[in-house]
Structure formats: structure tokens, C-alpha cells
Amino acid sequence: MYVWGNPKITQQGGVVNKLPYVTASPGIVYSFTFSCHKRLSLFIDSAIYDLFEKNLGDVRNKHRLFLIAWVIMPNHVHILLTPSYEIKLSSIARDLKQKVGYYGLTIVKTLDQQLYSKLVVTTGTTRKTRFWLERRGYVRPVSVEEDIHILIDYIHRNPERWKLVTSPEDWLYSSARYWLLGDERDLTPNPPEWLMDMPPTDRLRG
């Protein structure tokens, strides 16, 4: 089973809020993980899932990213991507989270006031609400020792491990159907050719 690395700041990976100047480089695959505030299940409606997926596609196009795999879970998301040019990791993370956080809160407030009340954070006289877990976005470069297919499989099997579905392709909010069935949806992965052309054990040695 794939094991997440320790979220320690390194030259190219770590906790997102501590990475304002770290640059993502072409040829390196990056793993992003974002959790909801207090790790609550805030993806309570298909509208929020659709919002994240639509925004993911927009961010992919805006920054010309190669989107490899993703899964949207009730309280967190995993994304696997690589850039086509050098770009700050924090810029990608901000664009992936900001819009979804704003509109996601609006949907939660409309559908579940009790849940929404748990998202209120008070600091002194300041009162605000949070969709995402503060300072807990985590991104790291995938090491060359890892087989990309194992990591993709790990991401896609999240819903199965949560007992949300019996097989990865049954979960609507991931790229599993593309990888397992060749099903192209509104948001289809666009892995780089250099990754797909390599033997499985060498796919990260671009």
C-alpha cells in the first residue's frame, strides 16, 4: 500500500502554506491533498463535487497542467499532476481551493445550517467561516522509486476503502473510469506523453 511521506518541508514539497516560493518543474509529478475544515464531510451535495471538478478543469487549462489522476472524497481530495512549465506550487494550490471554498460554503449554508455553524472560526473580534482545513494543504513531488500506476490505483481506491462503492469505477467523482474503462467525461485526464511512453517502473524518471 502506498504510504504518504512525512509533511516536512523539502526543496520541492511540503505543506502548501509554507511553499510560497517553491517552484514546480516540468517532468516531475506532484501529489496534492486538501482536506475540509475539521476534516468534516463538506461535499454534501453533487453540486459541490461538480464545482470542484469544473474548477479543476479550469485550473488545468489556465496553467497548462497535465492532469494525471484525481478523486474527490466527502472530506478531502487527491490530485496527481505535472506542469508544462515552471510555476509556483502555491499558485496551483490557491487556484484549486479558493473558488471551491467560497461557493462551497454557500451551498453548505443553504443545505445544512447545523453543519455550517461548525465552520465558523472566531479569532478575537474576527469571525469567519472556512471550507478547507487551514494550512493543511499538502503537496509533494512523487519520488522516482514509486510506480505511477500504484499511486494512481491508490487514489482511485479511496472510495472503495471508505465503502462508498464496491469498485473504483463506480465512484463518479474521480478519474477511475478513464483509466479503467477508457471512459472520457467532461473532465478527462491528459497525462504527458513522456510519462505514458515509459515502462511502468520508469514512468517517473523523466
Image: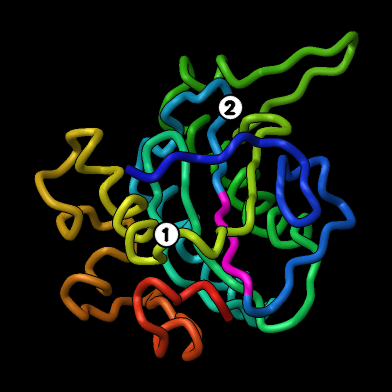
- Where residue 130 sits, quadrant-wise, is top right
Q: Position of residue 183 (x, y in %)?
A: 21, 78
Residue 37 badge: 2
On the rendered structure, is 126 left or right of 72? right
Amino acid found under the numbered disc labelled 1: Trp
Along the polypeptide, which appears first: circle 2 or circle 1?
2
Q: Position of residue 127 (x, y in %)?
A: 79, 18
Q: Residues within 10 Å of mark 2 (few under 14, many from 20)?
A: many
Q: Residues within 10 Å of mark 1 (few under 14, many from 20)?
A: many
Instruction: State whether residue 201 is above or below residue 37.
Output: below
Q: Give the color scheme: rainbow, by chain, secondary structure or one colour.
A: rainbow
**Mark in the foreground, 2 or 1:** 1
Residue 62 badge: none
**If the image is split into quadrants, where does the N terminus sit?**
top left
Residue 70 badge: 1
On the rendered structure, is 73 left or right of 160? right
Total count of labels: 2
Instruction: State whether residue 146 is above or below residue 115.
Output: below
Q: Give the residues in magenta.
A: 28-32
Tell me which secondary structure the magenta stretch mostly adopts.
strand
